[in-house]
Image (cartoon, rainbow, N blue to C red):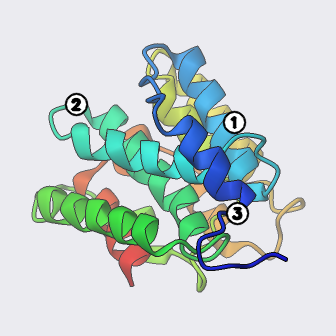
Amino acid sequence: MSGGAGERSPEDLEYEEERSVPMEAPTTPGAWDVLAGDWESLHQGYYLGSARHAVLECARHLEASAGADASERALWTLGLYYIGGYVIYGSPHGESETRVRAVMAGAERSLGGSPCGHPAHPCDDVPEGGELEGFPAVLELLAHPERDAEHEAALAAEFADPDGYADDDWRQSWYGGRLGRDVWACPQNLTGFARAFLA
């Protein structure tokens, strides 16, 4: 017989096994690439580890990143935006959802109100449902501050190809010539994504 009140699911058991092992924060662009790959596999539904653990570790690092540089803070915020829905929709878990929402609300409060000179931000144009195609390119951009403007422009061109994504206005708008590290890491943009997540 299964489904008893005290019975734990395979996801619960896997999470309990992993949660005592904290995820180290990446310290190199290559390590960020690996983590972004894990987030992408979680988002797409084929992550091999405990997805709940990965989401909660991302939340933990976001909470601890208040004093981090802009790119690192942006990576944790956008990463949680990208994968946090797992504990709300993918495999609902009340305690984890409460934790993720609390961390996002904290990020919204701490980041909000910072003035900037950008006329617009990607968060202004989040599609209905919040799904952002090509989001890993943004994580790559933020994880590699050593890459030059030419590489940034090549990424923008790749993800703004109208032949490949003719129906994706958001992609064409925010990857087409506007894939800038400064606008993605802008506190106003991160606040907008936190707000969209909480809506």
Give the labeled residue for mark 3.
Answer: 9
Residue, x 68% and y 56% (percent of image)? 11
Left or right of 182 on screen, residue 156 = right
Give the labeled residue for mark 2.
Answer: 68
Q: CA distance from mark 3 to mark 1?
A: 26 Å
Left or right of 75 on screen, residue 170 = right
Residue nearest the observer in this picture, 8 or 186: 8
Residue 120 seen anywhere in this rendered image of the structure: no
* Image spot of residue 111 (x, y percent): 17, 56
| Marks 3 & 2, CB-CB < 8 Å contact | no
Q: CA distance from mark 1 to mark 2?
A: 22 Å
| Marks 3 & 1, CB-CB < 8 Å contact | no
Left or right of 136 on screen, residue 63 = left
Residue, x 66% and y 46% (percent of image)? 14
If you read the primary sequence from the N terminus, does the residue marked by circle 1 or circle 2 appear first? 1
Left or right of 9 on screen, residue 33 = left
If you read the primary sequence from the N terminus, does the residue marked by circle 3 or circle 2 appear first? 3
Residue 37 seen anywhere in this rendered image of the structure: yes
If you read the primary sequence from the N terminus, does the residue marked by circle 3 or circle 1 appear first? 3
Looking at the picture, which amino acid does disc 1 mark?
Gly
Determine which quarter of the picture holds residue 20: top left
Disc 1 element = helix
* Image spot of residue 194 (x, y percent): 34, 66
* Image spot of residue 143 (x, y percent): 49, 28
Looking at the picture, which amino acid does disc 2 mark?
Ala
Q: Is residue 113 above or below residue 125?
A: above
Badge 1: residue crowd in 10 Å (few <14, some 14–19, many ≥20): some
Residue, x 82% and y 50% (percent of image)? 46
Give the labeled residue for mark 1.
Answer: 37
Determine which quarter of the picture holds residue 6: bottom right
